[in-house]
Amino acid sequence: MNKESRDEFMLGFKKLMPVLPAAIPFGMLMGVVAVDIGFWPSTAVLNSALVYAGTAQLAAMQLIGDGAGLPIIVLTVLVVNLRMMMYSAALAERFKNLNLRWKLLMCHVLTDQAYAFTWARYEEEPDLPLDRMKWYYMGSAAPLGVIWIISTSLGAWFGTRIPASWELDFAVPLMLIAMVVPNIRSLASLTAAVVSGFLSIAAADMPLNLGLVVAAVIGMLAGYFEEIWFHSDPAQRGEQT
Amino acid sequence: MSQSNLILMIVLTAAVTYGLRISFIVAAGRYDLPPVVQKILTYAPPAVLFALITPAIIIRNGSADLSLGNARIIAGLIAIVIAWTTRNLFLTIILGMSVLWGLNYLGF
C-alpha cells in the first residue's frame, strides 16, 4: 500500500466517519437482542460478521422470536437484501478489471453506505484509476464492518440479561421502524407499507408464517400499481433500507 | 430455535446475502431482471418490513389486540411519527421504549 493508496483509503474513511457513531449503539443493541432470543454471544457475533446486514439481521431476529421456520427466514433475508444485487449491478462495470480476490473481499463489505460513497466518488472524479478507487472503497466500507463486529460483541457479552418485564423484544420492531419509515417518501411506498401491514394481521393465522409472504408480495404489487396508475414521481423515491 | 439451527440460519442467510453482493460484480453482466420485476422490487423494503413490524405491535399472545390496553400500539405510532420527522434511529428507539415503559407503569 503506497502513499497514494493510503490517502485514498483515508478519504473514504473520512466520508464514513459520521456514520460510525450511530453504528455503535445499533450494533450493541443487536448483540443484546440476539442473546435475549437465544443466541450464544459467540454465534451472535458470528451472525454480524458473516451476514453483515443490519436490517436483514433484525428481520431474522423478529422471525425467530415469532417462531418462524428457516425457509421463511431465508426468503425474508433474500428479499430484504435484494437491493445488494442492484448495487452489485451498478458497480460491476467499474470493478470488472479487479482480480477475483479483491472482488470477493469487496463484496463482503458492500453496504448501502459503501455503494453510495463509491458512486459519489465516481461522479466527482470519473477517471479515477481503479487501483486508487479500490482503496477509497475499502476506506469507506471496511471500518464499518469492524465497528459492527466490535459493537455486537460488546452488546452480546456485556449486555446483562434483561428482565422480561422490560419487553426488550419491542426494540426490534422499533429499530425496523427507524430504518424504514424515513425512506417512505412517495405515496406508492406508503401504499406498499399500509397494504402489507394490514394484510399481515389479516393473514396472521396462515401456517408457517406464510402470511408474511402473502402480505409482502401483495404490498409490493399495491405499491407498483399505485405508481403506474397514479403516476407518483419515481424520482422522489430512492429508498434504501 | 436450537443453537445448531441458529448456526444453520446464520450460514444460510449469510450465503444468500453474499450471493446477492457478488451476483453482478463477480459474474459481470451475464443476466438481468426484467424492468417490471425491478420496479416491483423497489417496494420490497416497506412491504416486507411492515409485514414484520405490524404483527409485532398488534398481535399479543397469539391474537390481534387493537384495544387501548395494548400499549405497543400507542408506543409504535409515536415511534413512527418520530422516525418520520427526525430520521433519528436512537431517538426513535429510546422514545418508543420509554413510552411503552411509561404506559406499562401507568397500568395500561
Image: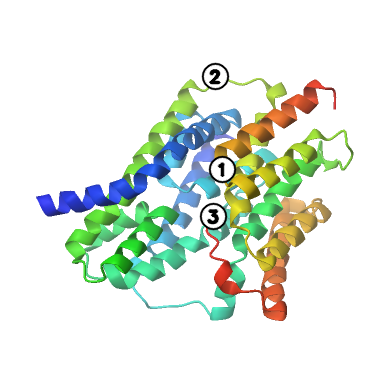
- Look at the image and tell me whether residue B40 can be seen: yes
Q: Residue at x 70, y 63 (%)?
A: A192
Q: Is residue B106 left or right of residue A151?
A: right
Local SS, label 3: loop
Q: Which residue is mark 1?
A: B88
The numbered mark at residue A12 is none
Q: Amino acid at mark 2?
A: Thr
Q: Residues within 10 Å of mark 3 (few under 14, many from 20)?
A: many
Q: Amino acid at mark 3?
A: Thr
Could you tell me residue B34's position as x and y percent?
Answer: 53, 80
Q: Amino acid at mark 1?
A: Asn
Could you tell me residue B29's position as x and y percent?
Answer: 37, 77
Look at the image and tell me in which quarter the C terminus of chain A lies. bottom right
| Distance (Cα) linking label 1 and label 3 | 14 Å
Local SS, label 2: loop
Q: Nearer the viewer, mark 1 or mark 3?
A: 1
Q: Nearer the viewer, residue B33 or A25?
A: A25
The numbered mark at residue A160 is 2
